[in-house]
Amino acid sequence: MRWDIFCQIVDNYGDAGICWRLARSLSSIHGQEVRIFCDDLPTLNLLASGVDPAIKESVELLPWEASHNNARHPVQAPDVVIEAFGCDLPERYLAGLFIAAEKPIIINLEYLSAEPWIMEFHGKPSPQSHGIPKYFFFPGFQEEVGGLLLDPIPLAGELTTQNIPKDLQEVWSKIRPNAKRISIFCYPGAPLRKWLDDLGTLDEAFDILLTHGHAELLDLSTGKQISFPKNLQLLSIPFVSQDEYDWVLSQCDFNIVRGEDSFIRAQLAGKPFMWHIYPQEDRAHEVKLAAFLDLYLETASQELRLAIIAAMTWAMPGTWLGSLDAWSSHSRVWRSHLLEKQYEGGLAARLLRFVS
Ligand code: TRH
């Protein structure tokens, strides 16, 4: 089938990240013909760089306006149109669909949630005055919903010089083999400085990998002399491609992640993580986090539950880091459980079945 994915980048990378991951899964695993129309092509290209060129070339990455041509070629209407996160289709593109002989099916791809209510809404029609069939599709953890984007499933790689991605080799040469590694990708407003100072009181060495832009969060890029505890080594990494970021997650002992894509990647890396969920004004994020923790902690001991809940809500590391070994085992079990639950192929495969 032919798929057109529409992606508008609101402020972060997540929208592009999810669209790219979906596109590559549909194309490279399921042999579908996929185009992405995006209003910020450089960001999309940045995320997609560093993958096998055969995968990158199998998906057409196009500027948003390129979709307008469809109005002149109604015969080229695809089989499926994806509105990522409810973005509105360009009017001229929609006009092209009205006059197409074969109407596509439109999918409103929603945000990921672990909340039970999505089970009722997933797959429901969204009747439109223009008559083209449109449905809601909710990614999620339960069997009844749209699944998770799994592609590519990261392997817990050995740390050898050969497999260190090129862009990370310089930083990695400074990594200390006996230090615990922590990667940080969070939103502004996190109590990061206090959190790091607390790590500094512990009797252990830590290498802290700050993802692109995070040195600024700590005022490190202003040239000011800022002192950090001696047991911490802060290392800034450049913005790397999605696959390289996955590699970083798989090499750390603990990861701080944020939007829905890095959140799932941290789980697939099989490592303990903190989800700095996107803060919403009505505190809806707290409900979302609690719904996830209900699933994630179902089999955890009471002690581990308390440690993980504390960590996920920015309690100081000294209060929960003692549970890191138990959490690491839990993370591996959770990863296997996710892969088993999504055995039919995750979101892309479920979407294909739904559309068929
Ligand atoms: O960028 P995000 O904060 O996106 C978020 C989410 O989509 C969230 O649900 C939404 O409500 C909010 O935006 C507005 O975080 P996310 O989803 O983790 O996406 C980050 C993407 O960037 C992910 O695909 C991984 C990728 N990435 C790289 O490719 N290289 C890097 O160096 C880093 C740090 C990230």
Image (cartoon, rainbow, N blue to C red):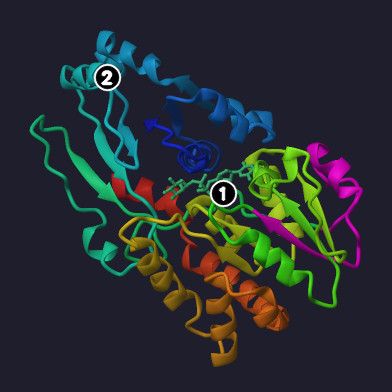
Residue 269 among those drawn in magenta: no
Tell me the quadrant of the picture where the C terminus can be found: top left
Q: Amino acid at mark 1?
A: Asp
Q: Which residue is mark 2?
A: 93
Tell me the quadrant of the picture where the N terminus can be found: top left
Q: Dot 2: within a 10 Å radius of its alpha carbon, few (fewer than 14), some, or many (20 or more) residues? A: many
Residue 107 visible to an observer of this rendering: yes
Q: Dot 1: within a 10 Å radius of its alpha carbon, few (fewer than 14), some, or many (20 or more) residues? A: many
Pick the front one: 251 or 72: 251
Vertical order, 115 against 30 (above or below)? below
**Picture coordinates of residue 271, whole percent (x, y):** 67, 67
Pick the front one: 168 or 67: 168
Q: Residue at x 37, y 55 (%)?
A: 280
Q: Residue at x 58, y 28 (%)?
A: 45
**Picture coordinates of residue 318, whole percent (x, y):** 70, 79
Q: Give left or right: position of 180 versus 87.
A: right
Q: Nearer the viewer, mark 2 or mark 1?
A: 2
Report the residue that reaches farthest toward the front.
224
Q: Circle 1 sits in a helix, a strand or a loop, which is it?
A: loop
Q: Which residue is mark 1?
A: 151
Q: Amino acid at mark 2?
A: Tyr
Residue 155 visible to an observer of this rendering: no
- The answer to whether the beta carbon of the residue marked 2 is less than 8 Å from any atom of ligand 1 is no
Q: Earlier in the sequence, mark 2 or mark 1?
A: 2
Magenta segment boundaries in residue numbering = 158-184
**Picture coordinates of residue 109, whole percent (x, y):** 33, 45
